[in-house]
Image (tube, rainbow, N blue to C red):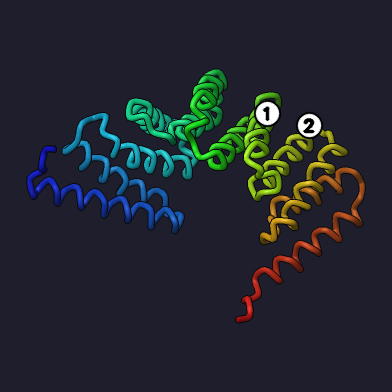
């Protein structure tokens, strides 16, 4: 194994520090500033390593994530694409998740045929990925399709994610709850309010059974459905319950 000169080792250490700074700033939602550190990290690594080195995947993904958070989808696309190409070459088990992220980016750009192609490529390697993470990324792809009014494509993603979660006995998990709420939102967007109410009710029951803090998006979504159905009293009560529960969640837990 080749030993790197001391100056190159120091450069790699600096690259790692830039990566940590990037992640810290991302946690603070300072994405533009974080991206600069991610790009410094990538530049250092590219000066020291082969163009298809596995280490580069992390830097490329960080840059793509920063671009996505700033809604710069066209800017994110080449970084995710290169990351997935290296991950494929290096046989990363996370390749499927990268491909789904790339598909989501293409969907945001209204490149729906490309998004579907990457989705199918991801499904071909899904068995190698962490199944919960894969299902969550499939759910997010469905949301991207839904926001662009690609109803059938969104529903297919939600169905695929649901099947994956059911296959690993995650039927009442937080991810399944959010997925069920997304399916309710899909019905709501298509003015199928009765079906939307059923799905939101199911999502709310999952949140209770998993003993997690109430998800504001799910409860508000249910309230909106009830309002569309003319059930304004129920909607008002639900919003009041949401406020009360949010207050309870915010209280410190006694020791």
Measured from the top left, where is residue 125 in percent x and y?
49, 27
Q: Is residue 115 above or below residue 33?
A: above
Q: Is residue 73 above or below residue 12?
A: above
Residue nearer the viewer, 213 or 226: 213
Measured from the top left, where is residue 188 in percent x and y?
78, 38
Q: How crowded is mark 2: few (under 14 residues within 10 Å), some or many (20 or more)?
A: few
Residue at the image position 56 percent from the left and 25 percent from the top:
110
Residue 150, located in which quarter of the rendered image?
top right
Residue 141, located in which quarter of the rendered image?
top right
Residue at the image position 54 percent from the left and 37 percent from the top:
134
Residue at the image position 63 percent from the left and 46 percent from the top:
175
* Marks 2 and 1 close (CB-CB < 8 Å): no
> In the figure, is residue 140 to the left or right of 66?
right
Marks 2 and 1, Cα distance to the nearest angstrom? 9 Å
Q: Residues within 10 Å of mark 1 (few under 14, many from 20)?
A: some
> In the figure, is residue 194 to the left or right of 15?
right
Q: Which residue bears the numbered disc 1?
A: 149
Secondary structure beneath disc 2? Answer: loop
Q: Which residue bears the numbered disc 2?
A: 190
Q: Earlier in the sequence, mark 2 or mark 1?
A: 1
> In the figure, is residue 186 to the left or right of 40?
right
Task: Report how many numbered discs are placed on residues in the image.
Answer: 2
Measured from the top left, where is residue 133 in percent x and y?
53, 41
> In the figure, is residue 51 to the left or right of 226?
left
Residue nearer the viewer, 169 or 10: 169
Query: Where the C terminus falls, by quadrant?
Result: bottom right
Measured from the top left, where is residue 60 in percent x and y?
35, 38
Secondary structure beneath disc 1? Answer: loop
Query: Where the N terminus falls, by quadrant?
Result: top left
Residue at the image position 70 percent from the left and 24 percent from the top:
152
Q: Which mark is residue 134?
A: none
């Amino acid at each position: 194994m080749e030993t790197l000169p001391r100056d190159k080792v120091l450069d790699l250490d600096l690259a790692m520090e830039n990566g940590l700074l990037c992640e810290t700033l991302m946690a603070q939602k300072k994405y533009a500033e974080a991206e600069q550190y991610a790009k410094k990290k990538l530049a250092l690594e590219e000066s020291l390593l082969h163009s298809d080195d596995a280490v580069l995947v992390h830097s490329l993904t960080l840059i793509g994530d920063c671009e996505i958070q700033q809604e710069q989808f066209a800017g994110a696309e080449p970084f995710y694409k290169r990351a997935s190409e290296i991950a494929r070459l290096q046989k990363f088990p996370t390749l499927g998740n990268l491909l789904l992220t790339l598909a989501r980016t293409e969907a945001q750009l209204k490149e729906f045929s490309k998004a579907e192609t990457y989705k199918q490529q991801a499904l071909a390697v899904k068995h190698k990925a962490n199944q919960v993470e894969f299902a969550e990324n499939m759910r997010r792809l469905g949301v991207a399709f839904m926001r662009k009014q690609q109803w059938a494509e969104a529903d297919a993603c939600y169905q695929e994610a649901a099947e994956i979660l059911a296959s690993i006995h995650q039927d009442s998990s937080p991810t399944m709850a959010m997925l069920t709420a997304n399916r309710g939102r899909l019905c709501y967007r298509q003015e199928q309010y009765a079906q939307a109410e059923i799905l939101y009710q199911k999502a709310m029951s999952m949140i209770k059974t998993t003993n997690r803090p109430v998800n504001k998006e799910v409860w508000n979504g249910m309230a909106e459905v009830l309002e569309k159905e003319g059930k304004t009293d129920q909607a008002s009560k639900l919003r009041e319950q949401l406020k009360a529960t949010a207050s309870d969640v915010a209280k410190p837990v006694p020791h």
